[in-house]
Every structure is written in structure tokens, then in C-alpha cells.
Amino acid sequence: MLRKTWMEVDLGAVITNYQTVKKISGKEVIPVIKADAYGCGDVQVVQALAEQGISMIAVSSIEEGIHLRRYFPGSILVLGPTEPEHIPLCIEHQITINAYSNAWLEKLPEDCTGLVVHLKYDTGMNRIGFKTIEELQHALDVLNSKHCTVEGIFTHFVNAEEDIELTYKQYYKFEDAVRALRYPFKYIHCDNSAASLTFQAPVSNACRLGISMYGIPASSKVLYPAVRLYSTVAMIKHIEAGESISYGATYTSSYDEWIATIPIGYADGLIRKNQGRLVYAGGVYGEIVGRVCMDQCMVRFPKYVPEGTVVEFFGPHISIEAMADDLGTIPYEIMCGISDRVTRVYTLNNTIKAEANSRFDH
């Protein structure tokens, strides 16, 4: 690592969280590795989980599936839409896709031998998926007539974290469809991360594990935080009252104070809205003052903090959920927003196992 700015991913915590959800749910767990494993590094996360014996992962696109096929021999399910013209590519790379609309069915080739499919049922998300049992039955008939292997059926809960009434409404709709179709699906899955920990869905035999692999939400009390964002103090200076900081002079000191420059900015995923937020370094909290720059930001500390001191943006002292609350967003967006120029450091049992940075991985 050349620039001292990095996101630390605790693979031991990822594995433990996977094992916890598997035990609590009593079902097969399908890790969701889309969006570069929520920004954590899909290859490293998949390789760590493969050692736990997982048989399927989920991604968002064919591109992600083909990329991970080099590292994972099991089933790879694409959760997002796939163009029928790319079906030969899916068959070639053994990528499982989902059927989601009548318009999509009409574009299927006459012979799809070798294509593995899951039916997507829209029970309330109103994103993609068939809306009725009749549409699902029609899809089954079409897929079987074109020699597809219909392996599974699934839906997605809208708000399993907070709205139990809505979740039950969606679940019963899904359960009714599964029972009405009377088809021997190998995989029946509706449980996302939140539902896997708190909701009983007896009709399903698998669950999709996404954000909870990384210990979110921490309020679950059974998960371990797996992701932290750090940088270091590159320079610290003592400024006088009346001096301004950064572009636009949006901050002017009211008294003499210590200002540290940190090599992380909005091109790294630390968006400008972080101005005014707290960070942690050297046993004290400091405030990001002045506008966040593309590659750097400035922090006001209550005391001298030596150059080279590690600065925590989220981690043991500032949770990613607290950061998300401050920014009016969710942890997913923060994790996915950490750019690939930020080095990922992978630890296992408090030991660094690997580092990855896209600028040096080619």
C-alpha cells in the first residue's frame, strides 16, 4: 500500500456472520456478492466463503457472473435483468438467470437447452418480476417448452427490517404462489439479510445474505462488524484565529487550532457532505472542516496529532451506521461508494492476509 488510505475487511468476521445466519435460519445461505461484494472485493470474499462450502452465490449482472466464474465453481445466480440475446453467453459460462416478464419470455430463443432459470415473483417491490400466479404458470410452461432447467423461484421483501405486517403480506403471497404451482423447485428463497435473522418463512429453503455478512445492522447483537475505513495524518499545522480552510473558505477558525490534512477525498468516496462530521485519531475526535477536496480533507483536532497517526472514518469508534445517519443515507451506499483506488486490506484472525488495489492488480 503506497497511499496510506485503506478499507479494512475482516474476512474472519464475514465467515462468522455467514455461519451465524446459516445456524439461525437453518437454511442454505446464498451470499450476495453483487457490486464487488458491496465494495469489499468480490474475489476475496468469494474465496473466503468458498472454503465454507457454499454452493451458490448471487450477483447483479452477467458481467459480474462471468468475472466470478474464474474464482467460483458453484452456481452463480444473476438477480437483475438479462437480455435474451445474451443467453448463449450464460449457457457457455454456466450462469443462472431469472425470468421476470412476459415481454422477456417472448424474446427467448426456441431452444434454451443448458440454461438454468429462477422465476422472479414480484410480491410488492414493483421492480422486476411476474405479478400473478397465472403469469408464473405461463412462464413455467414457456420455459419448459424451450428446454430450460427451471431451478428456483424467489421474491424480495420491501422492508423486512421494520415493517413486519408488510413482510407477512408479501410472504403469504409468495407462499400461495409456490404451493399453487406445485413444481419441484430446488431453491425457494425470499429471505434477505434482515428476514434471515428475524422472520420465519417456512416455505423457503434458502436465504440470500447481503449486508449482514459485514455485521450490519450492529443492532442484531449476533453479528460482527467486518468493515472499517482508515487514512492517516499527512500533515498537521497550527493555524491562527481568522484563517480559512479549503475551497470556498467555508470554514474560518475562531481561535488558534490544529489542522490536519488527510489523504482521502470525494474521489475516494468521502463525499463533500462529510464536512462537519467527526473522525477519530490518536485517542480524540476531530471535525472535518472546510470543503472535502477530491483527494484530501482537513480535520480540526483539539490537540496536536502526529503525522502518520491512523484516522478512522468508520470502524470501532464511529460505526458505519452512525456515519450513514449523519449523511442521510444507508451503509450500503457508503460501502459501495468507496472507490477502487482505495486499497482493500484483508485480515483474518488479526493478521493481514492480502491487499488489493485496482491500480496494481493488472
Image: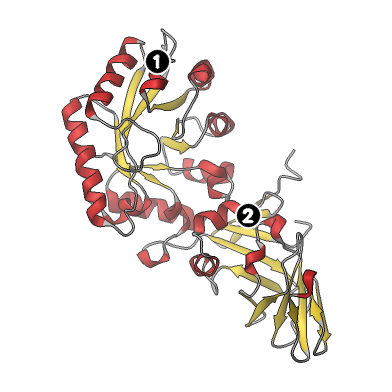
Residue at disc 2, secondary structure: loop
Q: Is residue 96 above or below residue 266?
A: above
Rendered residue at 53%/70% (across/down) = 326
Q: If you read the primary sequence from the N terminus, does the residue marked by circle 1 or circle 2 appear first?
A: 1
Rendered residue at 55%/43% (across/down) = 35
Q: Quadrant of residue 190?
A: top left
Rendered residue at 32%/38% (across/down) = 155
Instruction: Report how far apart the C-alphas of labels 1 and 2 lie in the structure.
Output: 39 Å
Residue at disc 1, secondary structure: helix
Q: Would residue 45 be found to the left or right of residue 263 on screen?
A: left
Q: Position of residue 143 (x, y in %)?
A: 34, 16
Determine if residue 116 is in view: yes
**Circle 2 residues within 10 Å: few <14, some 14–19, many ≥20:** many
Q: Three-letter amino acid code at disc 1?
A: Glu
Disc 1 or disc 2, which is closer to the eye? Answer: 1
Q: Quadrant of residue 362?
A: top right
Q: Would residue 230 be found to the left or right of residue 26 on screen?
A: right
Determine if residue 10 is in view: no
Q: Is residue 286 above or below residue 100?
A: below
Instruction: State the quadrant of the N terminus.
Output: bottom right
For the residues bearing labels 1 and 2, Cβ distance under 8 angstroms = no
Q: Would residue 192 be found to the left or right of residue 12 on screen?
A: left
Q: Which residue is mark 2?
A: 338
Q: Would residue 135 be found to the left or right of residue 81 on screen?
A: left
Q: Three-letter amino acid code at disc 2?
A: Ile
Residue nearest the viewer, comparing 231 with 241? 241
Q: Which residue is mark 1?
A: 106
**Circle 1 residues within 10 Å: few <14, some 14–19, many ≥20:** few
